[in-house]
Structures are given as C-alpha cells and as structure tokens.
Amino acid sequence: MNNFSFQNTTRLIFGKGTIAKLSKQIPSGKRILITFGGGSVKKNGVYDQVITALKGYEVTEFWGIEPNPSIETLRKAIDLGKEKNVDFLLAVGGGSVIDGTKLISAGLLYEGDAWDLVKKGYSAETVPLGTVLTLPATGSEMNSGAVISRHETKEKYPFYSNFPQFSILDPETTFTLPDFQVACGLADTFVHVMEQYMTTPGQSRVMDRWAEGLLSTLVEIAPKIKEDKTNYDLMADFMLTATMALNDFISMGVTSDWATHMIGHELTALHGITHGQTLAILLPGTLRVLMEQKKEKLVQYGERVWDISIGNMSDNADLAIRKTEEFFRNIGLATRLGEVNVGEDTIVEIERRFNERNVAFGEGRNVDGAMAAKILRSCL
Ligand code: NZQ
Ligand code: ZN
C-alpha cells in the first residue's frame, strides 16, 4: 500500500425529509445564491422544499446550469453572485449543477475569467458551498472535483477546489429521474469504482473488498431498480453507493486509472453524449485493449463480483469483460460507438487532441493518443 493522507470534510445528511434541515446547516444572515438546472426540481417538489426550508434568508436564484456545465453559463452566475455580494452557495440538482457551482464558488473570489481557473485545474479559495443532490451518479456531493465544458472550443476538463460543507441526500428526490438518467447514473457509479480498483492487484485488501462490495451492490440492485425506480430502499442504496464510489474512501493508498473517463470527456465535448453513456461504451474497450496488463485483477474481479471461476486466466478475464458489457446493455445503455453515431473521424480527432496536449492516462501512464485510438477502435 502506498503512503497517503486522507481527509473528507463533507457532512452527509441522508434520508427522507432531510431537506427541511437546511437552515441548521447555513449560518443565519448569509446571503445565499441558490443554483439550479433546467427545472426538474420545480416539477418534483424539491424547489418548494428548499425555499420553505430557507425562509428568512436573503436568497438569489440562478437557473439554467445545463448538463455538462459550461463556462459560458457559469460566467453569468459568477457575475450575478458578485453583484449580489453572496457569501454562501447552495447547489440544488445533479452533478452538473454541483460541479458548476464549485467553479462559481472559486470564480466569485477571482478577479479574472473563471476559465483561467479551469485551465489551471485547481483553486483553493472558494465561497462555502452546500448541496441538495437529486441524481446519484457523480459523487460530486462529497468530493472536491468538477468537470467544466467550454462550448466555443468543444473542450471539457476536470477542475478541483474544496469539498461541499454539507450535502443533503433524500432518495425520494430521485423518484422522478428518467430511465436513461438512472442507467447513466448506475454506469457512472460502476465505472468510478472500476477506475480506482481495476489496476494492479495486491495493493490493499481493504480497498479491494470495499470496491468489490460497491460493485456487487450495483450488480444486485440495477435490475431491481429497472423494475421499480421508486422503491425507497433500492434508491437509498443506489444513492449511497454513488457517493461512496467517488469520495476518496476507496482510493486510499492504491493507484487509479481514469483513462476511460478522460476519453469519455472527449466524446462528450465533441458530440454532447451523456457522461455515463460514454463510459458504458468505453470501459469494456479499455479492458479489452489492456487485458494483458490488467489480467490478474480482471480474474479477481470476475471471481468476486461475477462468480467466474471455471476456466484458465485468459478465459476468465475475457468472460469478466463480457459480463461487464452485458451489465451495461441490460441496464439499457449502448455499448458500441456505432450506436451513438461516432466513427473513425472522431477517433482520429481524439488521438490528435491527446497528442497535442501530450497526455497519457491509466495506472501505467500508457494510455496516450495512440492507445486511446486503439481503445476507441475496439468499441466500433
Ligand atoms: O437540469 P434539470 O432540469 O435539473 O434536469 C437534470 C438534467 O437534465 C435531470 N435531473 C436531475 N435530477 C433529476 C432530474 N430529472 C428528474 N428528476 C430528478 N430528480 O437529469 C439531467 C442530467 O443531470 P446532470 O446533473 O447533468 O447529471 P449527472 O449528475 O450525471 O452529472 C453529469 C456531469 O457530472 C460530471 C460529468 O462529466 C457531467 O458533466 N462528473 C462529475 C464528477 C465529479 N464532480 O466528481 C465525476 C464524474 O465522473 C463526472 O465526470
Ligand atoms: Zn464519471
């Protein structure tokens, strides 16, 4: 196990009716900017619950943070926040609203254009932020990351700042999610675990078992959620699994991969494909292409998550990859690039972009432009 330092400062407030506890978390007298997406919270009653809970505070609302939040939109929110002199932020929605609000929280204390912060990749100076989550997927509610897009240039990059001070997770808020978003959330959660687990074996027994516990939970609940996405206990397990998948708990002292995500961000930047959908296509491809490098861990994963123990190592690893692709298909997602109308021209462009930026991802730092192209071609 590698040396590590761990701190996660987000208070998690979980369960039915917990939005009513909002005012206990925000000091009185704060001037709050509340940020929203496109309006789902108006239809499912979350907006009313938030406004009722914040009676007595000075609040300003900002609407319209879109899926894959863009700098173009976030600049407007930063201007509004500066004009109103806000000193607390509350993000209400999915990962996009929360991610966008993380950039707003840094942009409010920055004189220049907030895109500078995205290019730098990091900002420690932020206005305090709380969240009310309505979509289990990204883990943004309990981590310090965000992913910000720039439409003008079709770019999308990770950005790191501070953890939310608190996040309220009421599983009942997820009951109105469209089936496609549920599927993308399940895929995103699954791949977050895999990015931190499917690397080199033998680094940490406890990290392995935690990761396998989360994966097995997803394998168990996914088909049941497909039958009934308004089952409280199922959605509660889904919501907590998504949070635990990307809040640093399963990455202590072990290496991570993240190549699937970095290629996926390019597909979203270039074609607007939903994040979880890009991962359902790319993860099986990454595993196919890096099968030799990841074989031992694939065999462990196959045995512990999919109960595969019959053949030789290569057969078992191969079956584990096929099971993974089948899992994504069964939850209702595409697993091949042709199904989302992506072809060779996009592969060439992603290879060019990786080469231009001189990047290489994965635990072996060997997923460069050429390897990314190989992975993409194996998904055709
Ligand atoms: O905008 P509204 O009207 O609210 O509708 C949203 C949006 O259209 C809707 N929705 C959310 N909650 C709902 C609901 N509809 C009905 N009922 C509800 N309860 O769902 C749509 C998608 O929302 P979005 O926030 O975009 O989805 P998600 O949470 O999957 O976030 C995706 C973004 O997060 C980034 C992705 O790259 C992408 O930009 N990620 C952030 C990470 C992080 N911060 O750590 C890590 C992830 O790997 C990921 O990259
Ligand atoms: Zn993700």
Image (cartoon, helix red, strand yellow):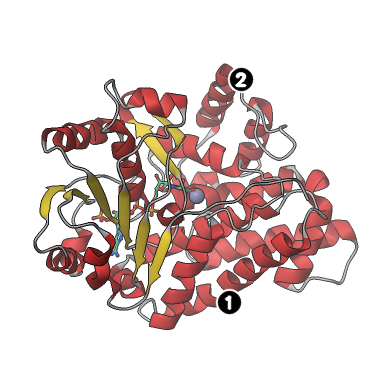
At 50% from the left and 30% from the top, the residue drawn is: 346
Q: Percent position (x, y) of residue 274? A: 41, 48
Task: Identify the element where label 2 is drawn.
Answer: loop
Relative to 210, 45 lies left or right? left
Closer-to-camera residue (299/95): 95
Kind of residue at badge 1: Glu
Q: How many marks?
A: 2
Q: In what element is the residue under mark 1? A: helix
> Taking the image as drawn, is residue 380 in sight?
no
Quadrant of the snapshot with the C terminus: top right
**Residue farthest to the front, as pictured:** 28
Q: Residues within 10 Å of mark 1 (few under 14, many from 20)?
A: few
Closer to the chain start, of discs 2 and 1, is: 1
**Disc number at residue 220?**
1
- Circles 2 and 1 in contact, beta carbons < 8 Å: no
Left or right, residue 262 beside residue 233: right
The residue at label 1 has a CB less than 8 Å from ligand 2: no
Q: Locate residue 328, reporting x and y percent.
A: 55, 61
Image quadrant where residue 153 sits: top left
Q: Which residue shows up at 69% across the image and 55% down it?
A: 197
The vertical placement of 372 against 294, above or below, is above
Does ligand 1 reach within 8 Å of label 2's beta carbon? Answer: no
Which amino acid does the dot numbered 2 rest on?
Asn
Numbered tag placed on residue 237 in the rendering: none
Residue furthest out toward the top: 356
Residue denoted by label 2: 358
Q: Percent from the top left, x then y, of residue 257?
A: 66, 43
Structural distance between the alpha carbons of marks 2 and 1: 40 Å
